Structures are given as C-alpha cells and as structure tokens.
Image (spheres, grey):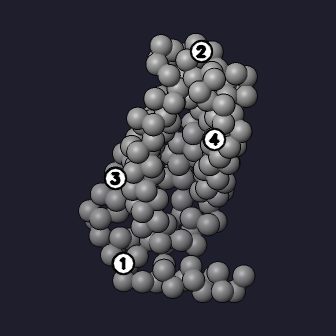
Amino acid sequence: MLQLQELISYFEDSGLADSIRENDVLFPLIESVHVLSICLVAGSILVVDLRLLGLASIHRPVGRIISGILPLTWSAFAVAVASGSLLFISNASKYLDNGYFVAKICLICVAGLNMAIFHGFSARDLLRWENNKAPPLPSRLAGGLSVLLWVSVIACGRWIGFTMQVR
C-alpha cells in the first residue's frame, strides 16, 4: 500500500500535475476533451446497444454495426483514458477519496467485463442471428446492461465535479 501511495504522490507532485492544477486554461481544456471523448464512447456504444435491444437499425446486421463503430469507440476511449489520467494526476489523492470517482472506475471495469462476456459468448454465433430484428436474450441483456452501466458512468462523472474537495 505504501508503494501505491508513493506512486500517487509522485504523479500528484509532478510539474505536469502542478501545471494542470494551477493553470486557468489547462484543466478546463483537458476536462472538455475528456467530456467530448466520453460522449463519443457512450454514444457509439449506445448505437450498438440499441441495435442489440432491437430498438434501432433493425434492418442492419449487428456485425456490420459493430465493425463500423468499434474503431471510433476505441479511439475515443483512448483519448478519454489519456485526458482522464491527466485530470487524475492533478489531484490524485482527492480523486481516490471521492466515492463517485471510485464508482465511475468500477463501473467502467464492469462495462468492460460485460463487453468481454458479450464478445466471448453471445457474439460467437453472431452470423446465425445478426440479421434478426430481435437478437437472442443474452445479447439483449448485454445491451441493456451496457446502457445502464454507461449512463451510470456518466452520472458518476458529473457528480465528481460537484463533490470534489480540491486543495
């Protein structure tokens, strides 16, 4: 535990973290990039989830939607992680003390697990059902859970800003 605290202090006390924390433009700029990238992540995932739920794009094959949108999702996720990491180091110890931040990170991990389970099990026989208007129940459940998780991630992210006590 001491090594983790030392690592957190190392990043939080860095010149980069000081610049982000103390510059009137840098933190809001990074935060704006983070919010926009999260919108792209959640929005692109929502496109797939709505198809899995049978609520949108029902005349397009699921696999075609996934393959078309996945590059955008992963690119936006990479930008969200990079910008989020910069925001995190600016006040790492305060973020770790914030329950909404911890919940957001946990929810993102659960969303990733949901996606891995979907791709590992439900999507294995995608070619058999991808043209059905209503995919099989496990796929619909994965889509519904994904919507719930990403809405929760966004809600927690918004509440971080309202509950952070910065130094």
Crowd tier of the residue under label 4, counting other residues whose Cα lies within 10 Å: few below 14, some 14–19, many 20 or above: some
The residue drawn where x is 55% and y is 17% is 131
Real-space CA distance between mark 2 and mark 3, rounded to the nearest whole angstrom:
37 Å
Real-space CA distance between mark 4 and mark 2, rounded to the nearest whole angstrom:
17 Å
Vertical order, 70 against 90 (above or below): above
The residue drawn where x is 29% and y is 65% is 26
Vertical order, 121 against 138 (above or below): below
Give me the disc on residue 57.
Answer: none
Discs 1/4, front: 4
Residue 50 place in picture, x, y as percent? 54, 23
Real-space CA distance between mark 1 and mark 4, rounded to the nearest whole angstrom:
38 Å
Identify the residue position indicated by label 2 in the image.
132
Crowd tier of the residue under label 3, counting other residues whose Cα lies within 10 Å: few below 14, some 14–19, many 20 or above: some
Q: Secondary structure at mark 1?
A: helix
Residue 42 place in picture, x, y as percent? 48, 39
Identify the residue position indicated by label 1 in the image.
16
Identify the residue position indicated by label 3 in the image.
33
Please, what is the three-letter code of the amino acid marked with disc 1? Leu
Identify the residue position indicated by label 4 in the image.
119
Discs 2/1, front: 2
Whether label 1 touches label 4, CB < 8 Å:
no
Please, what is the three-letter code of the amino acid marked with disc 3? Val
Front residue (pair 69, 78): 69
Q: Secondary structure at mark 3?
A: helix
User: Which one is earlier in the sequence, the residue at label 2 or at label 1?
Assistant: 1
User: Taking the image as drawn, is residue 144 in sight?
Assistant: no
User: Taking the image as drawn, is residue 16 in sight?
Assistant: yes
Q: Secondary structure at mark 4?
A: helix
Residue 162 place in picture, x, y as percent? 52, 50
